[in-house]
Image (cartoon, helix red, strand yellow):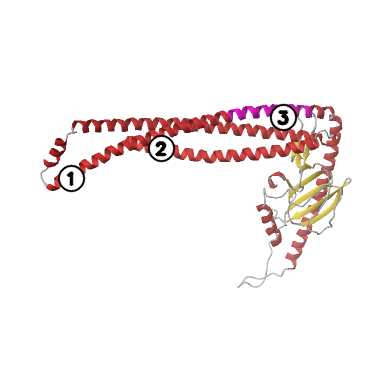
Amino acid sequence: MKKRIYFLLAFAFISGFLFAQTEDKAQLEKERQDIQREIKEIQDEFKKVKGKTKQMIGQYNLVDRKIKLQNRYISNISRELRLIDDDIYLSNIEIYRLSKLLDTLKAQYSRSVVYAYKNRSNYDFLNFVFSANSFNDAVKRVTYLKSYRAFREQQVNTIKETQALIAKRKEDQLAKKRQKDGALKNQTEQAKVLEVQKKEKDVVLKELKSQEKDLDKQLRAKQKKDNDLKRSINALITREIEKRKREAADAAANKPATPAPGSTGVVTTPAKTKVTREVTVFNSDADLKLNASFETNRAKLPWPVDQGNVCVHFGPYKIEGTKLRGDNPGITICTPQAGVNVKAVFSGEVFAIFNVGDTKTVMLRHGKYFTTYSNLSSVSVSKGATEEDGQGGKLEFLLMEDKRNLNPEPWLRR
């Protein structure tokens, strides 16, 4: 009985584990498809900007991103191989369990056959029935003999079913081994692709180093432009915050005090009031509704351009093997050519339009969130409109919460 319980528990565990692995494999396959799609998009983008001296850093970042994705792809295959190995291991356990069960069934059936052989004559059968003490006892003995015959037939069926199940498990195991061979072959091929990508990166890096002085000037100019952009944005947001604070203070000052029920009607004010934290000023009903809507759309916001890829990511960065470095307040999106349309990623008020150097910038407010679209060649809206449309070969896209810069990439739809 204990052995039977053990077998049942082992079967339940293995079945549950295999079901969980089925879900994991589906997730791995989806991840591989997403990686392949992104690699193709980056490769298409790289072909369009390849050889353009003004986009050397963008080329480098695209190739670097492609290599990181390729490593993820290879890691994905390694995880698949581990799952296949686990499948094969569990399959071996299951085959062993079924084989032991089959041996037990055969031994039981053998004993019943031997017993039936020893008592095979009709005389023994009739003697067993007619030696009963009563009619009811005889009926019970006949019923027992029929049950015993049915039991032997069931034993044969159970043995056949177990043999078929073992054969099926072995067939599945062969399929898993073929699947493993295919995954290993794919892993080898993807490793070769990775080596090609690394050589491609070396070529870009060599070209980039040969232009390091010119690129350093470009980066310094971009950093200066980024700093000018940040100062302009901070000044505008600070001005808006101060304006809202004044409006809130005026509203509070003009609001008549209402004495509490049962009081004398005299309202007293403490001599000193200590403010422990600053309350956001973007807290009107419309702001709160827009904030919630904007936050709900995290990872769902559309891209500000129809075609383009991130060529300089958010935050500090440096190019390996060079002195080139920078700190991006947003993301730089490279487009296949200049003159593409730029669209707002979310509904909101056009908060400001201003120049940064010789390019135009449009800033939209979405409650306490701000999106900024810079490096535009032209703007077709005025302050107070609901969307903007500009042009440019490189778009500087910034996202802020109040005065804090955020990384826009996690907010955009992949």
Q: Secondary structure at mark 1?
A: helix
- Say which amino acid is labelled 3: Gln
| Span shown in magenta | 183-204
Q: Which residue is mark 2?
A: 11
Q: Which residue is mark 1?
A: 140
Residue closest to the eye, 38 or 313: 38
Q: Quadrant of residue 152?
A: top left
Instruction: First in sequence, mark 2 or 3: give its number.
Output: 2
CA gap, disc 1 and disc 3:
82 Å
Q: How many residues crowd around disc 1 within 10 Å: few (fewer than 14), some, or many (20 or more)?
A: some
CA gap, disc 2 and disc 3:
46 Å
Q: How many residues crowd around disc 3 within 10 Å: few (fewer than 14), some, or many (20 or more)?
A: some
Q: Residue at x 66, y 72 (%)?
A: 265
Q: Disc 1, disc 2: CB below 8 Å?
A: no
* Vertical placement of residue 41 versus 293, above or below: above
Q: Residue at x 21, y 31 (%)?
A: 117
* Vertical placement of residue 102 versus 383, above or below: above
Instruction: First in sequence, mark 1 or 3: give its number.
Output: 1
Q: Secondary structure at mark 3?
A: helix
Residue closest to the eye, 138 or 246: 138
Q: Secondary structure at mark 2?
A: helix
Q: Is residue 194 magenta?
A: yes
CA gap, disc 1 and disc 2:
37 Å
Q: How many residues crowd around disc 2 within 10 Å: few (fewer than 14), some, or many (20 or more)?
A: some
* Vertical placement of residue 259 versus 75, above or below: below
Q: Which mark is residue 197?
A: 3
Q: Where residue 279 appears, x then y in whole percent?
A: 69, 55
Left or right of 359, for residue 114: left
- Say which amino acid is labelled 1: Lys
